[in-house]
Image (tube, rainbow, N blue to C red):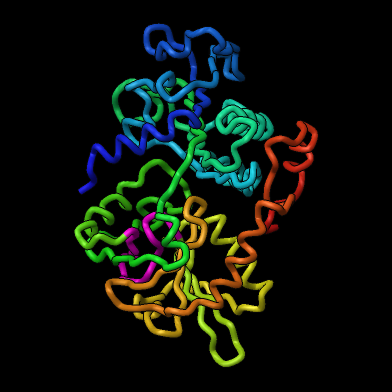
Amino acid sequence: MNNPHLVAEELTKIVNHTRVFLSMPYIQGITPFCMERAGVRSFTDASGLERRDGFFKLNEAGLSPLDHGNLYGDAVFEGIRIDDRRVLMLREHLDRWLESARKLELVFPYTREELAEIIVSLSQIAIGPDGTRAYLRPVLTRGIGNLGVNPAKCIAPTLYIVCSTISLYPKSRYEHGIDVTVSRKIRRNGPAQLDPNIKTNNYLNNVLALLETRAKGSLETIMLTDRGYVAEATADNIFVAEQLGDKKLLKVPAARYALIGLTRNFVIDTAKKLGFEVIEDDQMLISDFIGPTREVFITGTACGLMPVTHIDGLATASERPLTASIQALMNTRASDSRLSFRIDDSAQALTDYLAESGCFD
């Protein structure tokens, strides 16, 4: 179990460099008091409702207890990384956020360009003139509504973006790797239950898998499909690389039960450029990841690329030259203007960046 005092201590460390952008319709007597403070902007949105927005410190921001994102997980989100003052794959994250919202029939109160401008402004405020790294969590909820799961009860969406830090794994683990465990009782939702490619705030399936395996002390958990094939980790995609004679092979579970992660896409694209044969397989077994020649790693926006040393106590490759070649190209993302946007660049530069085609088009 976590030590609550240590958790509280860690939380206090993020206070000075965490800021929140908050936007919601104004309903007198219901909208939180923070939306009435000086400096909050009031305007009429496209629906004719009064909407208010502003930038806040952590202890200033507030969401309504009637927000359906909190009550029912009726919301969509993204996780975006900032390295060297550059927002990695901003354009692609915005497009995935917009697509998730479309699938849930949520309507953004801002344009794509306005969302990008808000993210850049928030990043500048949060990390200041000298900061270099941060993590963004943009969220769009169904918004304030009366009790009851029916989305028709909500008046209009709430939007908030947190700019802070995140550290899923200790730094030393990036060199030595982590052990992972397999959840066998809790299985990954299929698309008929909850499409894994709608990035919603409903992560209870993943939480239950972590609860099942937490007694084993591993830092991540692998989830299986209902048929027992590997889907993904609870917060990451999983890969296995292997040298077979002159052929370099990279295999990854197919996306039917897994989020098509942007880092996943980057790794696939990078591996192809490095001469790997890349196979997306919807029938991968745990045994396909085990053995002294199989380099296993997980990927995600927050974790980057993390080697996996053991799965349920069974060893993977101890030497990882193939993984290292992919990691080397991943480390160049922040210096690639096609893959990232520098938060200190001009408004016109942001417009030009957004107009370019995506990284994987």
Viewer-closest of 206 and 310: 310
Rendered location of residue 48, percent (x, y): 58, 14
Q: Can you tell which quarter of the image residue 263 is in?
A: bottom right
Q: In which quarter of the image is the C terminus?
A: bottom right
Horizontal side of residue 260 vs 318, given as left or right: right
Horizontal side of residue 23 vs 29, given as left or right: right
Residue 105 seen anywhere in this rendered image of the structure = no
Bounds of the magenta segment = 219-236
Which residue lies at the image location 27% right of the left edge and 56% below the top edge? 209
Q: Can you tell which quarter of the image residue 350 is in?
A: top right
Rendered location of residue 330, percent (x, y): 61, 61
**Where 225 sits versus 17, above or below?**
below
Residue 89 seen anywhere in this rendered image of the structure = yes
Rendered location of residue 303, percent (x, y): 47, 55
The question of residue 229 being in magenta is answered with yes
In the rendered image, the residue lying farthest to the bottom is: 245
Which residue lies at the image location 56% right of the left edge and 46% below the top edge? 81
Horizontal side of residue 87 vs 51, given as left or right: right
Rendered location of residue 254, percent (x, y): 48, 67
Which residue lies at the image location 61% right of the left edge and 19% below the top edge? 46
Which residue lies at the image location 24% right of the left edge and 37% below the top edge? 5
**Where 78 sits versus 195, above or below?**
above
Viewer-closest of 246 and 323: 323
The question of residue 224 being in magenta is answered with yes
Horizontal side of residue 205 vs 274, given as left or right: left
